[in-house]
Image: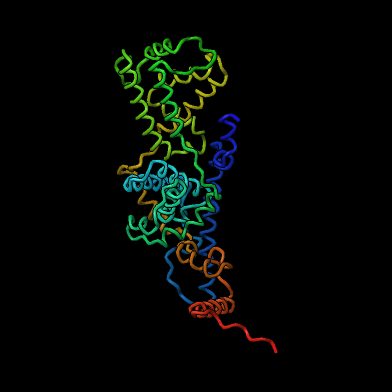
């Protein structure tokens, strides 16, 4: 199997790759469904209050006056918390793959879930903790929770199953980092005369090194490399820029949803040093190639997305907008989904309580009594008494 065929069998390609149109449609549907859910939840609370003839003070407005987040507002708040994830992981000095996986978990989760249903502030720590386990960088949950203010182990663990559901139980994330390192190792191989080209290239490795030194300088550079040392320095500089783009722009945009890992890292090389990127692609594809023309088109589209990426640190105007959205979000959250710790406890105590759906009062009392009896019996050293023999 080719590398491309192997990638097409991955869950990332099968479940988490989209066209721009399908991605936009999915997010639009999620926003609409969440808004309906919020209004239905307030309608249910109002109906219950009316039946009980009580005047309850509610945090939110009546259902007909709920001002839900727009799709654009949702994306802004999600993007902000993706940036917070980058900052938090950097602060904790966790590996880059943990950071990248955590952000993708967050982005994947909010394709089918809305901030109005589950606030990103509550999901973000769990996404990081799950990413640590997925990337074989396990820490005890207690020590992890201590890194966050006013956060308990229950706050971390309560949304974990909910998050895994949103991820469709797929934890593998194919990152472009390994491809980047491999590509630059190949470029460095050309500098010592060991580069490998396609069979259509008739030049010797030494001739390819000379051709590489004759490549036009990168944007902002003053001149071409005149010796191997300068050529290596140019490659290393491009590598640093490309890697930084992968650690920021590639994570904060929709690149993972729309492009393959090789397309992403090649796009970062295109932004870091376009002449060098063109030289590398020329060693892989013939000059006259339909695939090559298509690849250049795709890479430019991806590069443009990365160039226009939001920053992890919002400016003054963006902070002002985020405060407005967060204030609006506080008034349109689904009241039935706000206490994730409480919902998690209820589901553990009674599996029949799915998503916080309340049981009939008599059934609830009966099951509570059964649990209390079971707990008392379990405290006995020798367990509960054996049932008597039938006479």
In percent of width and height, residue 170 lies at: 54, 47
**Location of residue 285 with respect to 151 vertically, above or below:** above
Q: Quadrant of the C terminus?
A: bottom right
Front residue of 150/48: it is 150
Residue at 53% of width from left, 80% of height from top?
373
Farthest residue, direction bottom = 391
Location of residue 212 by image quarter: top left
Q: Is residue 45 left or right of residue 249?
A: right
Location of residue 311 by image quarter: top left
| Count of numbered circles on the image | 0
Q: Is residue 20 left or right of residue 189?
A: right
Q: Quadrant of the N terminus?
A: top right
Front residue of 328/183: it is 183
**Location of residue 363 with respect to 389 vertically, above or below:** above
Front residue of 112/198: it is 198
Front residue of 85/172: it is 172
In percent of width and height, residue 7 lies at: 56, 35
Location of residue 36 by image quarter: bottom right
In percent of width and height, residue 221 lies at: 31, 19
In percent of width and height, residue 204 lies at: 46, 10
Residue at 43% of width from left, 17% of height from top?
194
């Amino acid at each position: 199997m080719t590398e491309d065929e192997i990638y097409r069998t991955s869950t990332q390609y099968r479940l988490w790759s989209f066209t721009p149109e399908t991605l936009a449609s999915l997010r639009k549907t999620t926003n609409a469904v969440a808004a309906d859910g919020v209004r239905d939840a307030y309608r249910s609370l109002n109906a219950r209050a009316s039946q009980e003839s009580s005047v309850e003070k509610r945090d939110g407005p009546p259902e007909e006056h709920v001002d839900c987040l727009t799709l654009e507002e949702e994306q802004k708040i999600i993007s902000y918390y993706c940036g917070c994830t980058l900052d938090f992981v950097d602060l904790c000095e966790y590996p880059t793959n943990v950071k990248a996986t955590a952000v993708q978990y967050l982005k994947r989760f909010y394709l089918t879930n809305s901030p109005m249903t589950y606030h990103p502030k509550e999901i973000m720590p769990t996404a990081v903790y799950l990413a640590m386990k997925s990337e074989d960088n396990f820490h005890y949950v207690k020590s992890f929770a201590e890194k966050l203010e006013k956060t308990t182990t229950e706050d971390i663990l309560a949304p974990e199953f909910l998050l895994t559901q949103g991820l469709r139980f797929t934890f593998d994330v194919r990152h472009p980092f390994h491809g980047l390192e491999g590509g630059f190792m190949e470029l460095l191989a050309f500098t010592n005369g060991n580069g490998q080209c396609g069979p259509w290239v008739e030049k010797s490795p030494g001739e390819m090194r000379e051709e590489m030194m004759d490549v036009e300088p990168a944007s902002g550079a003053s001149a071409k490399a005149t010796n191997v040392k300068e050529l290596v320095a140019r490659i290393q500089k491009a590598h640093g820029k490309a890697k930084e783009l992968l650690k920021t722009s590639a994570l904060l945009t929709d690149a993972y949803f729309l492009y393959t890992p090789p397309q992403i890292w090649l796009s970062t090389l295109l932004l870091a040093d376009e002449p060098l990127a063109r030289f590398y692609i020329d060693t892989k594809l013939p000059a006259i190639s339909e695939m090559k023309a298509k690849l250049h088109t795709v890479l430019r589209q991806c590069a443009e997305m990365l160039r226009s990426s939001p920053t992890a640190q919002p400016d003054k105007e963006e902070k002002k907008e985020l405060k407005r959205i967060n204030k609006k979000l506080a008034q349109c959250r689904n009241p039935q989904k706000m206490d994730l710790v409480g919902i998690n406890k209820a589901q553990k105590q009674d599996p029949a309580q799915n998503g916080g759906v309340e049981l009939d009062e008599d059934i609830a009392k009966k099951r509570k009594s059964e649990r209390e009896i079971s707990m008392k019996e379990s405290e006995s050293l020798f367990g509960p008494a054996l049932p008597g023999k039938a006479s």
